Every structure is written in structure tokens, then in C-alpha cells.
Amino acid sequence: MATTRGAAVRYESVQKSYDGVSLVVKNLNLDIPPGEFLTMLGPSGSGKTTCLMMLAGFEPATHGEIFLNDRPINNVPPHKRGIGMVFQNYALFPHMTVAENLAFPLQVRNMGKAEQEEKVKRALEMVELGDFGNRRPAQLSGGQQQRVAVARALVFDPELVLMDEPLGALDKQLREQMQYEIKHIHENLGVTVVYVTHDQTEALTMSDRVAVFNDGVIQQLSSPDILYEDPQNSFVAQFIGENNKLSGKVVEIQGEECRVELDDGTQLKADKVNVGGVGDRTTISLRPERVEFDTHDAMDNIMNGRIEELIYLGDHIRVRMNVAGNDEFIAKVRNRGEKRNLSVGDTVPIGWSLGDCKALDPVA
Amino acid sequence: MSDTTSEQVLTTQDGKPLKQALASALRREKMRALLLIAPLLIFILLTFVAPIVDMLFRSVENSIVADTLPNTVVAMQEWDAASGNLPDEAVFAALYDDLGVAVKEKTHTRLGSRLNYEKTGMSSLFRKTGRRVKRMDEGGPFKEQFIKADKKWGQVETWATLKTFSPRYTSAYFLSAADAQLTPEGVKMKPEEQQVYLFLFGRTLFLSITITVCCLLLGYPIAFLLAALPLRTSNLLMILVLLPFWTSLLVRTSAWKVLLQQQGVINDFLVWTGIVSEAGRLVMINNQTGTIIAMTHILLPFMILPLYSVMKTISPTYVRAAKSLGANDCSAFWRVYFPQSVPGIGAGAVLVFILAIGYYITPELVGGTSGIFISNRIAYHISSSLNWGLAAALGTLLLVAVMVLFMVYDRIVGIDNVKLG
Ligand SMILES: Nc1ncnc2c1ncn2[C@@H]1O[C@H](COP(=O)(O)OP(=O)(O)OP(=O)(O)O)[C@@H](O)[C@H]1O
Ligand SMILES: [Mg+2]
């Protein structure tokens, strides 16, 4: 990060209701330091856009206060907040050329003509669209329009940029390319970015921190690696990456560890992350790539599973098995070249270490 | 196998040239498509195109003189009105023959009324002569007998008029529609006090533009509101907008009479509140004000509907984007929303203007004398004065004027900038 000229954002016990009956955002507390790339991730309808709109000023908060650089902004109209915004469908003005689109925020700020041109030119170069100034938005490809939208949100040097699913309309390849470009722009400019997506890969690759939303509540707020390695509850474990669930009952707690008895009677040792006391139900979460087929006695957990299906995927083999009555149990075997005798119908031993399996809140 | 050179003619399996086979295959398709639209095509041809062509034809058609007085017209060819002399005996003899036939077929009075449009007194001349011609001496000389029957036959102007209108096609109706006339001396403007049509055309244009502007000013905010409100509320409002369509035009216009007349509801209210005095009751009906108010009301939906359907497609995120970029409400509207609604304005304005310029019934009912349109005049000539040629010429001029305006509009605004949704 070259220089941090980003703004700090703070939500303080913010609530939002559209209809006065149900809360769409429930008691949101969120502190975003200057220059951070924060992503709001969550399923459809979880309130991400609503949070963003409250920050941009298009929706009033029903309760609570939002601070921008420690200044309360609930009563500041959107055009005085100085926040750049990239909309999902870009919202480029169709009756203006690309250059006019970029000059728009400068014109309404009464900036001098020469300075405007200079800034527009630099912004276009930043997104590598130097020659496209005279085109209409409709004459650009989706990816180019997207870049113009990013340039327009940045051209007036805002300290904070909001992006609401800006890559939603692009195909996979372009999406990945744009993810890196946006990331680099963020690194070069040092602005604070609040980014909304429901694509977890996008969230993991781009963000400093990710806030996982569900049902109007932040389920977990942490850096991408922690989110993957140490999910705090079953929702996060399921939502981020692939995940096996085994449900059972806590039979013993020892410090940070616990012993869980599965429904078929097998006992497992697991990290005690989100369980109540002995006797409570729990769901064990286990990543497919942590399942080992070369078991040895030192392993914390060893079980038997029957192979139901084998899918060859080149770099790895996906094995669907029946483990403890759950026939959706997935294991990934890395393809290292050695011959492995796995065939459908076999019952084979599998194992994993205690730290890879988390005892979380029960799911139905 | 696939290397066909350019000289080789591609053929089908049984040796027919490929192009021909393709054409005949396509012809069958085309015929079938044509059959599908044939009923509509015939309907439009019969009820729309044919009357228009007929109207265009009537505006120049003038065979009545040549049909009723065929021999006279031929005999008159040699005669020159500028000489100042009456035509010679042969022409009068021809006139006697022609009138004999015409009186038998009773066509001479129609000729009289036709020529009366051009020169007053012609109608009575023919009626009178028609009665006398039976009693004339078959042996001649006819010149004296005609002049005795009516001394107008002894005037050069009578014959000049007859000669001027003897060709089968005439520009007289068009000249008349433009306040000019065809005299034996050539084209001249009509006397000042008889000039009505150019003035009426001007007024029609002016009132139509005024009505269009009024509709736009009143309709734009409503359409904006309709497009911005949630669907349920906007549907309800839309019903209110369309309500005028469900009541008869006559009822609505009469309602305006009740509201606007000097002893009407609005004036009573104004007098009651003391805004105007009893003596100073406003004249709002049977004049231009009445026409403008009533027609704005009637045509308003035609402005609102295209505006609404265009505005509905303008995503609210544009205005949000403008605001997030620092524009206040006013500049977000004028610089981002308004330009995108221009196609709707274009469509609404064209629709309202074209409907207004040909409107008839409302000006007739509430326009008085100062608020009537050219169309009222056309209707008068069709149903009262029976001068269909002039009505056709006026109609044609109106049609041409609208087309010219349309082209100008296309130049300025661009027809592809007009969107109905
Ligand atoms: N203008 C509105 N009026 C009423 N309810 C709304 C409005 N906007 C959103 N909602 C409701 O609020 C909830 C959260 O919506 P929001 O748009 O914030 O979800 P989101 O997380 O952005 O979802 P997505 O990923 O689909 O964009 C939804 O249940 C939605 O129906
Ligand atoms: Mg959203």
C-alpha cells in the first residue's frame, strides 16, 4: 500500500427495516480501518446491499449511526458524502460518452476544464481504456463498461469506494481478470473499499477482511484464511468452501477439545469451537482435502467409509463415500502419480487429525 | 468434389439451376405470407388508401364543365378572352346544344353551383337560362336569344370564367385553399376580407403547438410520478389517467362547458371568493381558451402513456449514480434523467400534435368562432356547402403540412429518438 488516503467507516448498532415488521439488518457493528478492502459476503437477501445503501445514503438507517472518518453521516445527503460507487449494472449514463461520464463528477464539482481533462485522461489510462473516451457506453464490451464504471467511481478521488456485485454480469474468465485489476487499483490508490458479492472465491481472493452475512447478521468477520480454516459456526463452514458435516452429541469436554459421539456410535475427537456443554447436539465440520486414506495409529480420528462414487478430476480424485450413515461425505485424493486401489463398493479406513475437525453449532 | 469453379452453374439433384429452385421455393413462402396479411391489406386499401387517393384526386378534378358543355368547350378553344369581344355565333350554338342535353339530364344546375364558387351569380345564371332554353328558336341566331335570356351572356367575364374552368384539371381548389384565386388574368390573392384559410391554418398550428406544450408540462410530472411509485399505487393512478378514455368524448366536452361557462362552476366559485367581480366573469368557453383547456384534457393521456413507458425503462440507479458522483437533486435530474426521457417527450409530442392538428369535435363544441380549427372548415365544406373539391384541397394541404412538420421534426429530434416503450 503506497499511501493510505482511505476513510474509516464505522457502523454503530445499525438496524434497518423496510416494512416496520421485520428487520433486514439486525444490530450491525462494524469498524473498517482506513485503506482496508472489506467484502460483505452472503447469500441473496442477507442484507448486504442494504448495508451498502445505508452507507451511500440512499436508504436511511432505522436505528443507529454510521460514521465516516468519525463524523456521523446519517443526515448528510448522498451527494455530499463524497463516496464513489460502482453499481451492479454499472449505471453508466447512456446518453454521454465515456469521457463525459468520467467528467460528470468533476463538472458537478465545478472543476476547471483543463484539470477535468487531465483527470479524465489519467483515470482512463488507469483502467487501460485511453482510446475509448469518445465512445458511448453501449459501444463497449461488458468488461470495458465495468472498467469505466470503476474509473468513474475513482476519478474524483473519493476516500471510500463502494462496489455492489460489480462483476456479477461478467463471464468467469473476465471476472477473474477484473478481480486482480480492482485489487491492484486498490493497492495503488490506498482507498478504502467496501465490496459486496455473493461469490465466495471472489471474496477470498480480493479482500483484506470478509464479513459473512446471513439473515441480517454478520456471522463472522475475519481475514480469508481464518474464515476458511477456523469457521466460527456451521453457516460459515458451509458457505465458505466445501465441507462435510457429521452430526452427533457432545459426550466429553477437555479444555479446547471435545469428544463427540456420532449417531452410529462412533466417537470422534474435535476442536471445541461452538458447542454448549456435555449432552448438547453438535455438527462436526471437516474439509474434504483433510481426509487421509493412509491412516496410521497416531491419527486422532480413524473411521471406516464405503466408497459410493469416484470422480476423476485430473489434479485430484473426488471420492464420495458413506461415512457414519452420511452418504454425501466427500474426500479429495491428490493425484501424486502412485497407483491407489480405490474402487466403488470398497470399505476403506479414513482418518484425520483433531485440528481439522471442528465441533460447531448443530444444523437441522 | 467440393472444388466448384465459378463458371459451373450449381444445380439441384434433378438438374434445375440452383438459383431458380431457390427462388421458386422462396416464392411459395412469400405467397403464403402474403395470403396471411391479405385481409388486412385489402381492408386498408379499401378503407384508407382509396379514400385518400380519391381525396387527392378530387382536389384537382374539374371535369364538370367539359362533361356538361362538351361542344361549347371545343368551340371556345379559338376564342381569346383578352380580345375583349364576345365569342362568335358558333360558340353560342354549341352552348344551345349542350344546354338542351344538360337541362334534360338536369345537370346544368350542378354546373351552376360549381362555377358559383369561382364567380358569384353563375348559379342563378344557369338556372335561369335552363328555364329559357327550351323556349328558344331552334333556328337561331342564338347569340341574341341568350343575351335576351340573361344579359350576363353578353359579358366577356362570364365567358372568361367558363373558359378558365373548362380544362378537366384545375388548381383552383388549391389556390382557393391558400386564399388565392384563378382569374382569367391569372393567379391573384383574394380580397383581404375573404382571406380565411391561411389564417385558419396558422391558428390551427398555433393552437396545436400550445396544446402539445400544455400536455407536456402537465403530463411530464405525472408520468414521472407514475414511473417512480411502486407498482400497486402506480396502477391505481394509471386507471385515473385512463379514466377519460372510458367516458364519451361528448360527455367530457359538455362537462367542460358546465365548468367553464360564464355562469359556470369555476366562475361562480371565483365570484364567491371575490377574486373576480360579478361584472368581470371570465370568458373561458367558446373561444381559444376553451379549446386549449378541453383539448389539453382530452389529449393528456396520449402524452402521459409514451412518457410513462419510456420513464419506466430508466433505471433509478442512474439518478443514484449521479448523486453518488456528487450531483444534487436538480442537476441529477436535468443532466441524467431528463435527457434519457427525451424519446418519450418526442413520441408524446408527435402523437398529441398530430391528433390535435386534425381535431374536429371539441373545437366545434367549445371553440366558438375564435377557437375553431381548419378541420371544422373542412367539415363545413363537406357537409354544408358541399364544395368537396375545396374540402379535399384543404385536407391535402393539411396532410402536406403535417408531413413537412414531421420531416422537420425528424431533422431536429430524429425519429429514431422516438420511443413508445
Ligand atoms: N426497497 C426495499 N423495500 C422493501 N424490502 C426490501 C427493499 N430492498 C431490499 N428489501 C428486502 O431486504 C432484504 C435484504 O435485501 P438486500 O438487497 O440488502 O439483499 P442482498 O444481500 O443485497 O441480496 P442480493 O445478493 O440478492 O443482492 C431482502 O429480503 C429484500 O427483500
Ligand atoms: Mg444486493
Image (cartoon, helix red, strand yellow):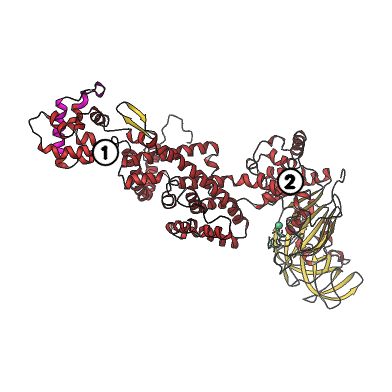
Q: Can residue A292 be seen in this snapshot?
A: no
Instruction: Report the front residue among B385 and A32.
Output: B385
Residue A247 lies in the magenta stretch: no
Q: Along the horizontal axis of the image, is B283 left or right of A331? A: left
Kind of residue sitting beneath label 1: Arg
Q: Is residue A15 above or below residue A190?
A: below
Which residue ends up furthest to the right in the rendered image? A255
Instruction: Report the front residue among A200 and B278.
Output: B278
Q: What span is in magenta? A: B76-102
Q: Quarter of the picture for ligand 1?
A: bottom right
Q: Along the horizontal axis of the image, is A262 left or right of B5? A: right
- Indicate the chain on which mark 1 is placed: B
Marks 2 and 1, how far apart at CA: 81 Å
Q: Residue A213's x, y, as percent?
A: 77, 62
Which residue has dot 1 on it?
B114
Badge 2 marks a residue whose secondary structure is helix
Residue B81 lies in the magenta stretch: yes
Q: Which mark is residue A206?
A: none
Q: Residues within 10 Å of mark 2 (few under 14, many from 20)?
A: some
Majority SS type along the magenta span: helix
Do tag 2 and tag 1 residues touch (Cβ < 8 Å)? no
- Indicate the chain on which mark 2 is placed: A
Q: Is residue A196 above or below residue A357?
A: above
Kind of residue sitting beneath label 2: Met
Q: Which mark is residue A178?
A: 2
Q: How many marks?
A: 2
Q: Residue B325's x, y, as percent?
A: 74, 46
Q: Along the horizontal axis of the image, is A81 left or right of B215? A: right
